[in-house]
Image (tube, rainbow, N blue to C red):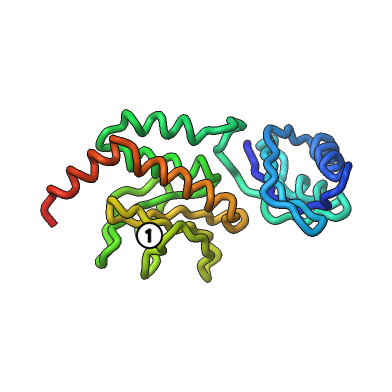
Amino acid sequence: MLLRLRITLLDQPGSLGRITRVLGIAGADITQIVVLDRGEGRALDDITVYWPDSAPRQSLIDALESVSGVIIEGVWSTRAGPDTYPELEILKYITTAGDRALATLLDSMPVLFSADWAAAGTEKAPRRVVHSSWRAPEEVPFPADTPARPTASTLASGLHLIAAPLPPLALTLLLARADGPAFHRTEVHRLTRILEIFLTLPAVERGVARQSHRPD
């Protein structure tokens, strides 16, 4: 299985080498390392690894915790492979998706962001879900007010969210992660850029035109 590890570690020579060595000894095959943040002598990294299905995650956590200075922010399952820019592939598919441009985007979001589900609903109450990905709940927890820009938050239940406006479509997009850490600001920034490109695609513009002619 693919796992995503989010850790903070000392930002000094040799720190990442100690991490990779410990993970290799534990049996993890590293496929990708992304530096999310660094400052004040520490770095925040996302590490994607192949981990044997039969092996307990706790042994992986124990291995990481044996490295001095490491703090584990989260360990969770991911379906995102080691591709460098998978969002470019998704945007390519969206350009030919026609009426299913929005559905294609939402179905792809959980994979791109190692999340659990995504959904889009009307901005005005009563909220109506126009499309949701696999594993989305029947009652989608849309915010009372759609934020002006993509914004991360965590509900009292522990569910991590990014809520984002889709102004031309008069919709609110919601991306959710139940397992793992809260969405980092780099993930919010990445989603912002994807949506900016998505909303300029001809397929989306055609969808807006068709929606404007539908009866309420």
Instruction: Tell which of 170 and 62 is nearer to you.
Output: 170
What residue do we see at 42% from left, 56% from top?
Answer: 164
Residue 96 percent coordinates (x, y): 32, 28
| Residue located beneath label 1 in the image | 140
> Residue 17, located in which quarter of the rendered image?
top right
Q: Taking 111 as reference, is 24 left or right?
A: right
Residue 140 percent coordinates (x, y): 37, 60
For mark 1, give the secondary structure: loop
User: Disc count in the image?
Assistant: 1
Q: Taking 98 as reference, is 51 left or right?
A: right
> Residue 32, located in which quarter of the rendered image?
top right
Query: The C terminus is located in which quarter?
Result: bottom left
What residue do we see at 52% from left, 48% from top?
Answer: 115
What residue do we see at 85% from left, 45% from top?
Answer: 15
Give the answer, above or below, for where 118 lies relative to 157. above
Residue 18 percent coordinates (x, y): 86, 42
Residue 53 percent coordinates (x, y): 66, 37
What's the amino acid at mark 1? Val
